[in-house]
Image: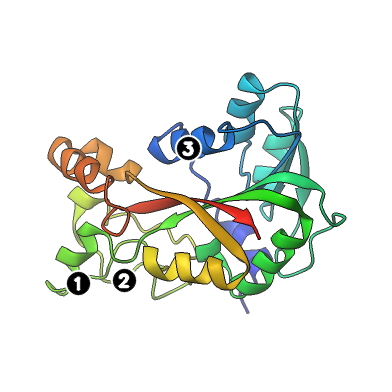
Amino acid sequence: MLTPARFYKEHTTDVPLFDDRLRKVIAFALDRPFAALFDIGCGRGTLIEALRAKAPEASYTGLDVSEESATIAASKGIKVVKHDLAEPLPFDDGSFDVVVFGEVIEHLFDPDSALDEIHRVLKPGGRLIVTTPNLACWLNRILVPAGFQPVFTEPSARRRYGFYLKVFGQNSNLVQGHIRVMTTTALLEFLRDRRYSIERVVGYKFHVLEKNPIANVVDGFFSRIPTFASGVVVNAQRA
């Protein structure tokens, strides 16, 4: 049987690109001073590396379930914990000023418990920055009526089905383990229900579409509308 630990041992899913999403996460993180930042799903440490260069006085901790990614991040001098979010976080209450939860929530069977744990390890008034693909993005509003599988979703843990359009990056057979792809409105309601207040929401561009000039322009336009954007970045506060 395929377990999460085995899946992410065989599938390295982080994208170490300084893309539109990452730039917006950095802008949110640096919006005000912080002493301790926790990057859940840190991958190879791309975000922490960028933040350390801009705010070197802060402390940084990363977490990833992939042993390969965690090892690469640790080789860069980053404090990394290899941990499965199915278990409680190994930190005391109120340990961090900022938690970044980037491109992780869509991978979790139980995102409710993960957000509860993040709430616990955040300091009162601490900030949570969440990013995730948008199920109701402009592209899926075209693909689904035409009978195609919506981007960011996966009906199988072994291979991709229903993807045919190379121009939209659908030809790849890379399975990333997406099981909780949400709309922007569902994500905001979910966060509020888990005791987070929403400060700001912005869309981000899908890095795959940047390779196609026309798709990139369209994606850039819709990134200004969070409910239509390819993905969203949410800046929330621990209530």
Three-letter amino acid code at disc 2? Tyr
The residue that mark 2 highlights is 161
Label 3 environment density (alpha carbons within 10 Å; few <14, some 14–19, many ≥20): some
Residue at 24% from the left image edge and 36% from the top image edge = 211
Of the image marks 2 and 1, the number of the one nearer the N terminus: 1
Question: In this figure, which residue is indicated by the disc labeled 3?
Answer: 22
C-beta proximity under 8 Å, tags 2 and 3: no
Front residue of 5 and 88: 88
Where does the image place residue 212, in percent across and percent down from the top left? 19, 38
Task: Name the residue: 81% across, 52% down.
Answer: 94
Q: What residue type is labelled 3?
A: Leu
- In the rendering, at what x and y percent does residue 32 appear? 61, 32
Whole-percent x and y of residue 168? 22, 51
Task: In the rendered view, tell whether residue 45 sits above or below residue 64.
Answer: above
Q: Mark 1 points at which residue?
A: 144
Q: How far apart are marks 2 and 3 (CA)?
A: 28 Å
Between marks 2 and 1, how big is the CA–CA gap?
A: 14 Å
Left or right? Give the position of 117 relative to 14.
Answer: right
10 Å crowding of disc 1: few (<14), some (14-19), many (20+): few
Q: Which residue is found at the position 70% from the left and 34% from the top?
A: 34
N-term-proximal mark, 1 vs 3: 3
SS at circle 3: helix
Q: Judge by depth and name the residue closer to the eye, 46 or 60.
A: 60
Q: How far apart are the two marked residues, 1 and 3, measured between alpha carbons?
A: 28 Å
In the rendered structure, the answer to whether residue 226 lies left or right of residue 27 reads: left
Q: What is the crowding at mark 2: few (fewer than 14 residues within 10 Å), some, or many (at least 20)?
A: some
| Residue 42 point in image, percent of width and height | 63, 44
Residue at x 65% of width, y 65% of height: 115
Three-letter amino acid code at the position of disc 1: Val
